[in-house]
Amino acid sequence: KRLKSIQLPLYAFLALENNLFEEEKIIAAYVDLYRTGEEKLYVSLKLVDEFNQWIKGTGFRGLLSYVIQHIVNSPYWYPAVDDACDYCPYRYLCRYCYRK
């Protein structure tokens, strides 16, 4: 119901699609490399089964399809009009900043 980010589920999805997991369950976590090195789970251990069903089933595929279609079909984006565009990794894809 609430998506924290799409990046970590995308990694889990791609790993599953390429048979990189030997185990049945995926426990996805962020690693805080900047401070403590501590792992922070994407979902609580109580929700691991639900997360796995979402990633393996059609739920994540549907979300991914929606996000890609939204990116491709959006007529324009609203980036910040300042020097931030110079540091954006997507500036060459952005229809607004491409003119720079």
Image (tube, helix red, strand yellow):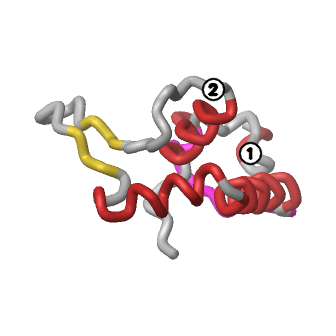
Q: Are marks 2 and 1 in contact (CB under 8 Å)?
A: no
Q: Is residue 96 above or below residue 59?
A: above
- Along the polypeptide, which appears first: circle 2 or circle 1? 2
The residue that disc 1 covers is 94
SS at circle 2: loop
The x and y percentages for residue 49 are 44, 58
The x and y percentages for residue 31 are 28, 35
How many marks on residues?
Answer: 2
**Left or right, residue 96 beside residue 15:** right
At 57% from the left and 58% from the top, the residue drawn is 53
At 49% from the left and 40% from the top, the residue drawn is 24
Q: Is residue 92 above or below residue 94?
A: above
At 85% from the left and 52% from the top, the residue drawn is 72
Q: Pick whichever, 67 or 49, lies toward us.
A: 49
**Which amino acid, mark 1?**
Cys
**Left or right, residue 19 beside residue 3:** right
The residue that disc 2 covers is 19
**Left or right, residue 93 beside residue 13:** right
The x and y percentages for residue 73 are 88, 59
Q: Pick whichever, 54 or 98, lies toward us.
A: 54
**Which amino acid, mark 2?**
Asn
Q: Which residues are magenta?
A: 75-85
Q: Is residue 76 magenta?
A: yes
At 56% from the left and 24% from the top, the residue drawn is 20
Q: Pick whichever, 79 or 14, lies toward us.
A: 14
Instruction: Give the alpha-carbon distance from disc 2 to disc 1, as whole Å.
Output: 33 Å
User: Label 2 crowding class (10 Å Cα cut-off): few <14, some 14-19, many 20+?
Assistant: few
